[in-house]
Amino acid sequence: MQTRGRRTSPHEGAQPPDLERIGEELNRYMRMFNTYLAFEIDRPSNRIIIKIIDTETKEVIRQIPPEEMLRIMHNIDELLGLLVDERV
């Protein structure tokens, strides 16, 4: 999404109370499937991670974005940092 030449993320306009309310509503729905959602922040990339977790076993059923994708994004960030360091 772009606004006057400035890139914005899709969740940039959401406020914490809105996110909490949305999370609660989603978890009410997910209880029908014996699962719940956990929201985390990946500190190196500052990205939101959503995990679908089995209520009984606490096993992570699915993670968005997947762990492998996070590793790839971190590696790309490191490579870009090296390129910038070499140019300076």
Image (cartoon, grey):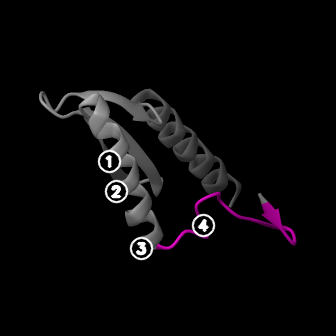
Pointers 1 and 3 in contact (C-beta within 8 Å): no
Q: Which residue is mark 3?
A: 17
Sequence-first disc among 1 and 4? 4
User: Per the image, is 47 magenta?
Assistant: no
Three-letter code, disc 1: Arg
SS assignment at label 2: helix
Dominant secondary structure of the residues highlighted in magenta in the image: loop
Q: Which residue is mark 1?
A: 28
Distance, label 4 to label 3, CA atoms, is: 13 Å
Pointers 1 and 4 in contact (C-beta within 8 Å): no
**Frontmost residue, 19 versus 2:** 19
Residue 24: mark:
2
Write the residue at 32% across / 47% down.
28
Three-letter code, disc 2: Glu
Pointers 1 and 2 in contact (C-beta within 8 Å): yes
Sequence-first disc among 2 and 4? 4
**Frontmost residue, 71 versus 20:** 20
Distance, label 3 to label 2, CA atoms, is: 11 Å
Q: Image check: 30 left or right of 12?
A: left
Q: Residue furthest left?
A: 56
Magenta stretch?
A: 2-15
